[in-house]
Image (tube, rainbow, N blue to C red):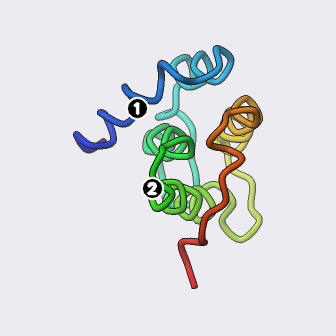
């Protein structure tokens, strides 16, 4: 995880609903797999989903789409990632519209 991803996670954690925060902190992400390997990079992308910057959110959606939902496959990281997304559905940033990351 980069320094900027770590800083983003720290900033975002305090504003998350309790269920989302607990899931993020209590899941052993490194023990899960996605299309490109270990799931240890997934928490940074999940936190980026509620970033104030729409470009950061768009990039996070693209990363999650490529790794977690790659070609419609299911991976061990899919369930905890989906539970996190469900837990943040009521977050105010979740209602914001933005452009897609890919053309």
Direction from residue 56 to residue 24 in the image, left or right: right
- Check disc 1 and report the residue beneath it: 9
Give the foreground label among 2 and 1: 2
Residue 67's label in the rendered image is none
**x 52%, y 54%: residue:** 57
Q: Please identify the quadrant where the N terminus is shown.
A: top left
- C-alpha separation, residue under disc 2 versus residue under disc 1: 13 Å
| Nearer to us in this view, 45 or 54 | 54
**x 48%, y 43%: residue:** 51
**x 51%, y 57%: residue:** 54
- Check disc 2 and report the residue beneath it: 56
| Nearer to us in this view, 19 or 40 | 19
The image position of residue 82, as x and y in percent, is: 73, 41
Number of numbered discs present?
Answer: 2
Q: Quadrant of residue 8?
A: top left
The image position of residue 25, as x and y in percent, is: 51, 19
Q: Quadrant of residue 77?
A: top right
Direction from residue 11 to residue 22 in the image, left or right: right
The image position of residue 87, as x and y in percent, is: 73, 29
- Outermost residue to the left: 3
Question: In the rendered structure, are the residues bearing label 2 and label 1 in contact, judged by CB atoms less than 8 Å apart?
Answer: no
Under circle 1, the secondary element is: helix
Under circle 2, the secondary element is: helix
Mark with earlier residue (2, 1): 1
């Amino acid at each position: 995880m980069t320094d900027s991803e770590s800083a983003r996670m720290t900033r975002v954690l305090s504003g998350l609903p309790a269920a989302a925060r607990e899931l993020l902190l209590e899941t052993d992400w490194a023990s899960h797999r996605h299309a490109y390997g270990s799931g240890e990079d997934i928490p940074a992308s999940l936190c980026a989903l509620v970033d104030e910057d729409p470009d950061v959110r768009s990039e996070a959606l693209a990363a999650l789409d490529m790794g977690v939902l790659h070609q419609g496959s299911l991976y061990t990281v899919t369930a905890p990632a989906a539970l996190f997304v469900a837990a943040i559905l009521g977050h105010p940033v979740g209602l914001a519209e933005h452009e897609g990351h890919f053309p």
